Image (cartoon, rainbow, N blue to C red):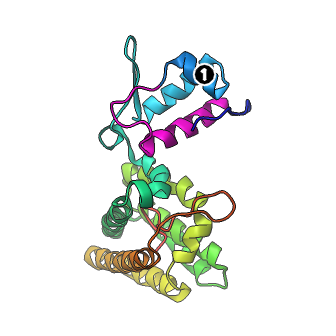
Amino acid sequence: MLRPVEKQRVAEEIVEQLRELILTGHYPPGAKLPPERELSKRLGVNRASLREALKKLEHLGLVRIRQGDGTRVQNFMETGGIELVSYLLPLAPAKHPRLLRDTLEFRRVFGREVARLAALRAQPEHLDRLRAIADKAAGDVAPEELFDLDFEFYVALTAGTCNQVMGLLINTVREAVQSYASVLTSLTDPAEEVRAHHRALLTAIEARDAEAAARTADHHLERGAQRVLAIVDKDGTAGGSNGAGQPHVAAPSPMTGD
């Protein structure tokens, strides 16, 4: 339920509380939020901060603000954007069980097409970046660093598509990947498999073999998805708590985290 927030980041904390209540169904689509006066009192904030937060929620596609009608919750599956995925994944086991499989499916489609386009369009500087990341990943690195490098490899691969929208899309999930890196690291493929994947994909891209690049990425991402889902099905959960107050997310990012 709602609780008073600290002054340092008032609007952000209001957004976090209301966003969670909406995404977990406490305020379902079509429901009206309490009046501003009541909300501000329960949160212990002034109405200016509350209005700022509500505007941010409207920008996320979670609410609609209409004079005379108040603030009404939207069906975020119809009005929200890709940025909501990072907030929904921790809630997936209990509230949005299909989301994990949908995320893995999207990751596979995206990764496959990114690899295909990169093989056709990557410029010398993109290839140099991919080689540098693969070389670093081939060294003696900790699992956490290898996870970061694998994600950066796909970021560089996306840059090689020369598609600005794809680049913006992977940037959108970057923060979520970094936030849950400690959990996602435990789900990555064995180090040698990650390194072999980098080498095989680089070989296909350097040869400008778009179909081979797509097949290589697709096989790798399919195998990773199957492994993650097997772990989740065995444990019976993709969430929980890590003991430090942070939610577990037994799911990779939409782009990586195999």
Residue at numbered disc 1: 40
Residue 91 relative to residue 52: left or right: left
Q: Position of residue 92 (x, y in %)?
A: 43, 58
Q: Residues within 10 Å of mark 1 (few under 14, many from 20)?
A: some
Dividing the picture into quadrants, the one containing residue 50 is top right
Residue type highlighted by circle 1: Ser
| x 57%, y 73%: residue | 185
Q: How many marks?
A: 1
Q: Can residue 132 be seen in this snapshot?
A: no
User: Does residue 113 sit above or below 136 in this rendering?
Assistant: above
Q: Is residue 106 magenta?
A: no
Which quadrant is home to the N terminus?
top right
| x 36%, y 78%: residue | 226
Q: Can residue 164 be seen in this snapshot?
A: yes
The stretch of residues the image draws in magenta is: 10-33
Q: Position of residue 37 (x, y in %)?
A: 56, 16
User: Does residue 136 sit above or below 98 in this rendering?
Assistant: below
Dividing the picture into quadrants, the one containing residue 6 is top right
User: Does residue 238 sit above or below 200 in this rendering?
Assistant: above
Task: Give the camera-side residue of 58 and 122.
Answer: 58
Dot 1: element: helix
Q: Position of residue 175 (x, y in %)?
A: 56, 53
Q: Position of residue 116 (x, y in %)?
A: 30, 69
Q: Is residue 16 magenta?
A: yes
| x 46%, y 83%: residue | 199
